[in-house]
Image (tube, rainbow, N blue to C red):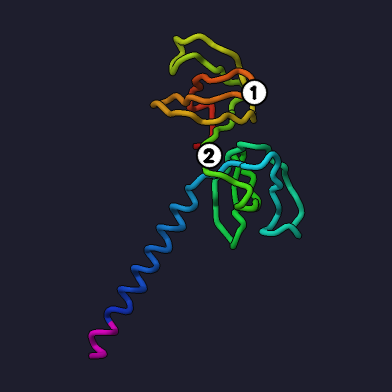
Amino acid sequence: MPEKILPIIPRVATVALALLLSTGSAFAQSMVSVKSQMLNMREGPGTRHPVIWQLSRGYPLQVVSRQADWLKVKDFEGDSGWVSRSLTAATPHHVVKASKANLRSGPGTKYRVKGSMAYGETLRTLQKQRQWVKVRHESLGEGWVSRQLLWGW
């Protein structure tokens, strides 16, 4: 009987390790956005750690890891820190990563420009279509932006 149990243990450990690695990998690829009006990004997981950035509603973040109720996140510029999970949401947003991005009436350069947005502006993601993302801008309304000019969902 022990001969049959011993070979199972390495297989169980291998499966558990594979699940752990795949979960960590999938988790690392997940995104969240700021749910509250303002969110403090901290140096460590807890309110005792200093605030390094303040982020506004909708700002998208990539989840790197998790510790209890805290998420280690990275933004579009590569800055990382910790945020309270309860102040984040799974609502898709993008941020403008180019110095200027045009908001267009349709998904392509042949559509009219409704306005332009600056580096760092946050946009609510509504739809994705190939190389274009339909977004909602706070003052310009809904429109389409080239995906290569954005970072986020």
Q: Position of residue 61 (x, y in %)?
A: 58, 43
Q: Residue at x 29, y 84 (%)?
A: 6
- Res. 150 mark: none
Q: Position of residue 89 (x, y in %)?
A: 56, 44
Seen in the picture, residue 86 relative to 20 is either above or below; the reply is above
Amino acid of disc 1: Ala
The stretch of residues the image draws in magenta is 1-6
Q: Secondary structure at mark 1?
A: strand
Rendered residue at 53%/20% (across/down) = 142
The residue under label 2 is: 91
Residue at 56% from the left image edge and 12% from the top image edge? 114
Looking at numbered disc 2 in the image, what kind of residue is underneath it?
Thr
Where is residue 59? Give x, y as percent: 61, 37
* Residue neighbourhood size for the residue with mark 2, other residues' Cα within 10 Å, grouped as few (<14), some (14–19), many (≥20): some
Quadrant in which residue 67 is drawn: bottom right
Query: Badges 2 and 1: C-beta atoms under 8 Å apart?
Result: no
User: Between tags 2 and 1, which lies in front?
Assistant: 2
Residue 3 is inside the magenta segment: yes
Relative to 98, is 2 above or below?
A: below
Mark 1 lies on residue = 118
Give yes or no for residue 120 being in the magenta stretch.
no
